[in-house]
Amino acid sequence: MIQIGASAATIDTPVEHLIACHRRIEQRLNTLISAPAHIETNRIAALDAIRKSLHFLDTSGTLHTEDEELSLFPRLRQKLSASELEFVDSLEAQHAEAEPLFAELKKLALEPDLDVTRFLDYAARLRSLYSQHIRAEDEILTAMARRSLDESEIAEISREMRARRASPERI
């Protein structure tokens, strides 16, 4: 969502880009919770919304995690205290914890007869995990990044993010 007066969240401003991506992830997670309620009345639209949300999380969400784990976290690790390192480790552990939940959601979505109850259970668990995770990243991680990273490191993260998105394997 574009906010009047807010600076643009582009890859040129990677920390802001990561925050903006959090909003898009939250929107897709909310769709995964709300869409199944429409299976009985508008099955095609509900399943399409689920499919598109899962696709976003599988593509852009994966890039987002890679941006953090391959570009941001390694640079921060060199500059953090022991307790801050534990915090970054906990974020990576949460990424790993989300993977099987997401895999099960994708599997359930492919079944011809969607088990709405199971799907909602996994979607709610994933959204709950990411709600806490995103809040911690928005409030703590971004402050650490802004405090710790210099302009050249920010520029390098930006270049890496851009290269990740231009990779032929992503097309």
Image: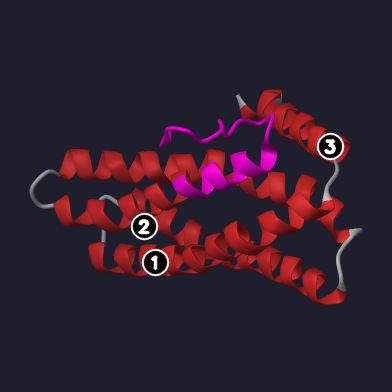
Residue 49's quadrant in the figure?
A: top left
Q: Secondary structure at mark 2?
A: helix
User: Residue 122, which numbered label?
Assistant: 1
Residue 90 to residue 27: above or below: below
Amino acid type for the residue under numbered disc 1: Tyr
For the residues bearing labels 2 and 1, Cβ distance under 8 angstroms: yes
Q: Badge 1: few (under 14), some or many (20 or more) residues near its Cα, within 10 Å?
A: many
For image coordinates 85% across by 40% down, the residue present is 153
Q: Secondary structure at mark 3?
A: helix
3D distance between C-alphas at marks 2 and 1: 9 Å
Q: Secondary structure beneath disc 1?
A: helix
Q: Comparing marks 2 and 3, which lies closer to the viewer?
A: 3
Label 2 sits on what residue type? Leu
Q: Nearer the viewer, mark 2 or mark 1?
A: 1
Q: Position of residue 20 (x, y in %)?
A: 53, 42
Q: Which kind of residue does numbered mark 3 sit on?
A: Glu
- Earlier in the chain: of badge 2 and badge 3, it is 2
Whole-number angstrom distance, CA of label 1 to CA of label 3: 40 Å
Q: Is residue 134 magenta?
A: no
Q: Residue 61: where, in percent of width, then height?
A: 55, 45
Q: Tell which circle, 2 or 1, labels the residue nearer the N-terminal end.
A: 2
Q: Earlier in the sequence, mark 1 or mark 3?
A: 1
Query: Which residue is the site of mark 3?
Result: 151
* Residue under pointer 2: 108
Residue 81 is left or right of residue 64, and the answer is right
The foreground one among 43 and 5 is: 5
Say left or right for 92 vs 136.
right
Res. 63 in view: no
